[in-house]
Amino acid sequence: MAKSLKEEKQQAVILERLTGLIDSNNKEHKAILDQVIKTNSRVSKLEIWKGLITGGMVIINLFVVPILSWLIYKHLNGN
């Protein structure tokens, strides 16, 4: 009987420790998930901003630079 009581106490201690680890793991998992969501949101906003800047640079290179080049050429040649 003594061995059985000792085993039950050991099992209770093990169960208590596992429960504590599960609770701790759940808290840490939630904190990590919250941080990942925040980071992904910031990265998405930066990717949108980068796309807008890239698009703006394409428009400038396609339209503004050739017009300015033409105006400078005309001004330097006096026409």
Image: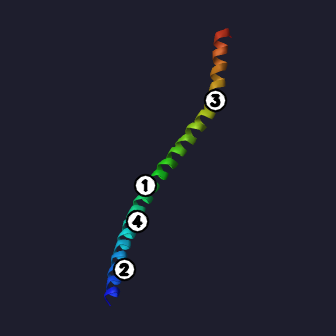
Amino acid beneath label 2: Gln
Residue 61, label in figure: 3
Q: Nearer the viewer, mark 3 or mark 4?
A: 4
| Disc with the residue nearer the chain's start (2 vs 3) | 2
Asked whether the beta carbons under mark 2 and mark 4 sit within 8 Å of each other, the answer is: no
Viewer-side residue, 16 vs 52: 16
Q: Earlier in the sequence, mark 2 or mark 4?
A: 2
Q: CA distance from mark 3 to mark 4?
A: 53 Å
Three-letter amino acid code at disc 3? Asn
Please tell me whether mark 3 or mark 1 is closer to you in this view. 1
- Tag in front: 2 or 4: 2
Residue situated furthest top in the rendering: 78
Find out whether the residues at labels 4 and 1 contact each other: C-beta distance under 8 Å: no
User: Label for residue 11?
Assistant: 2
**Percent coordinates x, y for residue 61 in the rendering:** 64, 29
Q: Secondary structure at mark 2?
A: helix
Q: Residues within 10 Å of mark 4 (few under 14, many from 20)?
A: few
Q: Quick one: label 4 or label 1, which is nearer the N terminus?
A: 4
Q: Residue 58's x, y, as percent?
A: 63, 34
Nearer the viewer's eye, disc 4 or disc 1? 4
- Disc number placed over residue 25 in the picture, else none: 4
Tell me the quadrant of the picture where the N terminus can be found: bottom left
Q: Closer to the camera, 73 or 49? A: 49
The residue at which mark 1 appears reads as 35
Q: Who's the residue at 32% across and 83% down the image?
A: 6
Q: Earlier in the sequence, mark 2 or mark 1?
A: 2
Q: Residue at x 34, y 84 (%)?
A: 8
Q: Quadrant of residue 27?
A: bottom left
Looking at the image, residue 31 lies above or below residue 79: below
Amino acid under disc 1 = Gln
Q: CA distance from mark 2 to mark 1?
A: 36 Å
